[in-house]
Image (cartoon, rainbow, N blue to C red):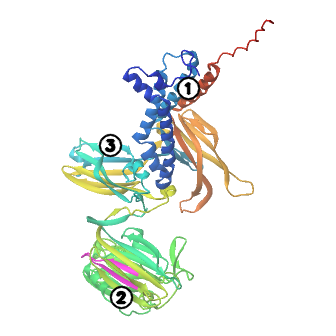
Amino acid sequence: MADDDGNAFRSSLARAEGRSPFFQLLAGIGSAPMAALLIVLVAVVTWVATYYEGAYGRDAAQVLVYQAWWFNFMFLVLGAAVLCAVVVRWPLRRHQYGFAVVHAGLLTLIAGFAVAGRDRLDGMLEAAPGREATQVELPVDYCAAVVEPAAGPSTGAATAVQAIHFQPIALAGYPSFLRYLVHPLWPVTVPGINRLERPAPLLDLPAAGVAVAVTAVADTARFEPGRSEAEQGEPAVRVELRMRTPGQSGESRLAGRWLTPDADGGQLLVGPLASTFALARDPALARAFAQPPAQVGAGGRLRVCWQGQVHDLDLDPAQSDQKLAAGSCTVQVLQRLEHPGQREGKLVEVPEAEHNPVLRLAISVGDGDKTRRTEAWVAAGALVPPLGEGWPEFLYEHPLWLAGVGQGKGQGGVAMLLGAPDGTLHVRTATRSRGPGPAAAIAGGGGWSGYVVGDAQSPMAVGLDLRWLPRSRPGPEPVAMDPARKDRALRWVEFAVRCGGQERRAWLPRGERAALTVGGMQVLLHYDRGRLDLKRDRGFAVRLERFDEGRDPGGMRSASYASEVTVLADGGERTARITMNEPLRVGGVTLYQTAFRPEAGPDGAPTGRQLSIFTVAEDRGRWLKYGGSALIVLGMALLWWWRPRRPAAAAPSAPTPQATP
């Protein structure tokens, strides 16, 4: 290729010889070695980023690599190199126009990506058959705070509200890209709970004097909240079950969960063991529970705690109506079921059901016109949740658990846990075959470990591990997960709220709310996934009419899928079909058919229909990308058309004949 004077091609660095230092700098930036270095650097970073994504997930790679300032800076330098390569050749000759157009296309393409930026819309829309779909889940999270005086709005102070989108992944403790590069020499641990050295400011409401910050993040945690000790909070006990079967060398973990009185009725049913947890308001019930159980009759014994006294009613299976009177409290047994089961919404005797005796009680408290009445079910082997202040407490002791009498189907053992008013946890265990087992009393913040079935030398054993917290607050329990399945975990964020020189902290799982009182103000925090409302923000909604799935011939794998939808807008309705290769453009956004999953009914059972999942995207730089690509093609054509052509070599002249002497 010839230069301006028709000589051989001259590089950018050659053109800068003898020029000013500024021109030499431009030539160095626009030189071919610099361009090659940048292209290789981008290729290597992108290649390593695929391994980073495999280790920590798509979202972490998106935030910590592709949206990082240094990654964008590489493209900024690449764009500067492209521009300088043209500037050092100015003014251009005709054969350089193609070179300039190609570089203009590259600049336009880079500008398209810059315009799209990190604020481009890229979310997921889930559409159920026959229902409007409007909520697009965004790859960012959302936090909102509502602040008002703790005494209520009647004090005259205004209510302050603020909301923001933020990215917790940047605070979750994932290693930087540079740190990941040296991980073979310096191993990197998967982050669990990442506590920030400095709180990250999030919301500031100066009118109310309230500031909200992020102090810790757990990106992958169990859906069931963990527990930690706190000055204020509710009682909780951690129940861990382990089991060894004949022929098994070691013990395997069956289940582990925190039990609170309000969660699932304080019950955990796993394998051969049922664990129940309740709180006693009256110390008398706790003392009676802690005593070694005595032998009871075939009908069992009902223990009623009323006004600091425990009254026993020995139940006779032959009598259908028994009553216990204790001062102003009367308890009457209305119904006794040995094998309870549900029939037409009622609890009735079902012979084929599990042997789990229950009583239906009629309770009356008070005298004369002030008498209050209620009914309650009491199950053997389970502590009855308190009915509330001013009502008695109950314990139904049955020989099924206490003496090994009346074996039947169902759970083979029980661990009854009772929290006493003094902060002690009392433990009673029993099995249907062996009767009473180990009993224990655990002080606040302590634990207990033992065997309910067998022992360390038995071929068959069921072990129980307990951890007791009289006061606790919910928090995350990190879990190691396959990065491709991180959506099955739950993200937690710890928020710190400051007001009037005071601070309170609270863990919130995504999708939950919490009310905190601090500095005389009540702050309601709402933490959830960021969402875009298509109907409100884009003026349309989508209703899924039908989902079609194509399969490989002779196979069961999905080969294609498509959705028939109705677009509902202010201007009316229209039908459309979205396939894997045919997106739908409406309201300034594009809907791509991405995936599908089975629909589940209210009871969790599959309905036989599919939910369609769309990617909703908006790329403001799309036309710049199209235009840049077109300019590159045009420039390449001009390079070929206006390429310098060497003049044809002249034909050799015939030798001049010499005269004959």
Distance of label 2 from label 3 (alpha carbons): 59 Å
For the magenta stretch, what is the residue range? 415-429
* CB contact under 8 Å: marks 3 and 1: no
Q: Point out residue 330 in the picture as x, y percentages from the top left corner.
A: 33, 81
State the residue position of label 3.
162
In percent of the image, x 43 and y 33: which residue is there?
77
Label 2: state its secondary structure.
strand
Q: Position of residue 232 (x, y in %)?
A: 25, 64
Q: Amino acid at mark 1?
A: Val
Is residue 207 toward the left or the right of residue 646 in the image? left
What is the crowding at mark 2: few (fewer than 14 residues within 10 Å), some, or many (at least 20)?
Answer: some
Q: Which residue is mark 1?
A: 102
Q: Quadrant of residue 603?
A: bottom right
- Reply above or below: 477 against 36: below
Q: Estimate how packed mark 3 is, as few (under 14), some (14 to 19) or many (20 or more) residues with alpha carbons within 10 Å.
A: few
- Magenta: main secondary structure equals strand
Q: Is residue 417 left or right of residue 557?
A: left
| Sooner in the amino-acid sequence: mark 2 or mark 1 | 1
The front one of 523 and 312 is 523
Q: CA distance from mark 2 to mark 1?
A: 95 Å
* Residue 357 shown left or right of residue 581 in the figure: left
Name which residue type carries label 3: Gln
**Nearest the eye: 640 or 297:** 640
Q: CA distance from mark 3 to mark 1?
A: 48 Å
Quadrant occupied by the N terminus: top right
Please name the amino acid that badge 2 sits on. Leu
Q: Which residue is mark 2?
A: 313
Q: For residue 159, which quarter of the picture?
A: top left
Asked if the stretch drawn in magenta spans residue 428, the answer is yes
